[in-house]
Amino acid sequence: MTTQTQTPRRAIARPERPPSVAAVGPWQPVARVGWGRRAGVYLARPEHSPPTLPPSYVVKLLLDETDAWSIEALRREAEVGRSVSHAHLVPVLSAHLDKPPYYLVMPRLSGRTLTVHVAKRRISTAMALCYARQIAEALAALDESGWTHGDVKPDNVVVSPEGHATLIDLEFARRRGQGQARQPAGEPALLGTALYMAPELAVGALAAGESTARADIQSDLYSLGIMLYEMLAGQRPFTGRTLPEVLRQQREGRAPSLRARCPWLPCELALLVRQLLAKDPLRRPQTAREVVRRLMALEMELLADR
């Protein structure tokens, strides 16, 4: 949940020292592994477990028990994580949402985030296709159940040592076609991460109140396109020193040619990335299943060429 300073989800600061927790309902927190302004994330084991038992669960605990917006977001996250089951989407195993403490329980995932792999620049074309295809499969499962993810980015993808990719963090999930929720008074309406945000969501993203943008699979696919470009080229197509600058590039900038940066890539792959990054959602692939099929075909082609 830790957010990089140059790509804030919202223009608000997280607490420097999240509180330590002795117990969360029937769970024993063992170590804090992440936090944001609204929630802390802890490795945990069931209560009364021996202290030698490795923690196999993750508890996401709401920090402010009076924040109605955060409670509603946690309830929505629980609804998505319990109703959409897919091998590449993190499940919510249980939740406590009727009264404090408010929390979710998820399985502990082995591996590291895709951000770590990108930073090391050790992602081959074959692995980039494999990771992108797995995330597209998770997005297809969400879309076919009537949901969008809302924050697709490397920080929200955990890759196991065996190469299994899991899409995590359903905090910004929305019903398909649903507008963004009204924010607490005085806070900006930026929901998501600017460097991976689709142009239609970037429009007016810093304005207070309720955004007119509607959640759609095409927005998630744009974010997937940014992520795929970054895996292949080793850098994102759009950068900026300030949040308004990043959002302006998302709305108006043209991504540098992927083939110019990586001339060895197949033309069909460069075409797919360019289509995913189209400013007009209607010019992007219209379903995640289409993206899965095209990525799978590219994987097979690459395998055949070896």
Image (cartoon, rainbow, N blue to C red):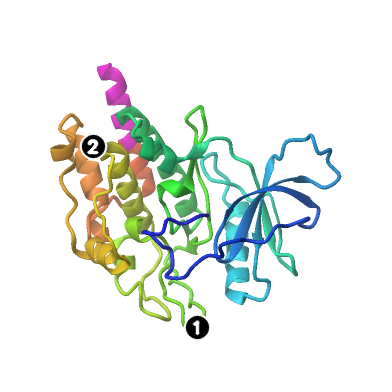
Label disc, if present, on residue 143 of the rendered structure: none
Residue sitting farthest toward the top: 306
Tag 2: amino acid? Leu
- The residue identified by callout 1 is 185
Question: Is residue 79 shown left or right of residue 209?
Answer: right
Q: Give coordinates of residue 174: x percent, y percent.
A: 48, 63
- The residue identified by callout 2 is 269
Give the secondary structure at mark 2: helix
At x 36%, y 76%, the residue is 212
Among numbered discs 2 and 1, the one appearing first in the sequence: 1
Residue sitting farthest toward the front: 16
Marks 2 and 1, how far apart at CA = 44 Å
Depth check, mark 2 against mark 1: the one in front is: 1
Q: Give coordinates of residue 59: x percent, y percent.
A: 67, 52
Q: Nearer the viewer, residue 285 or 40?
A: 40
| Region in magenta | 295-306
Question: Is residue 21 shown left or right of residue 216?
Answer: right
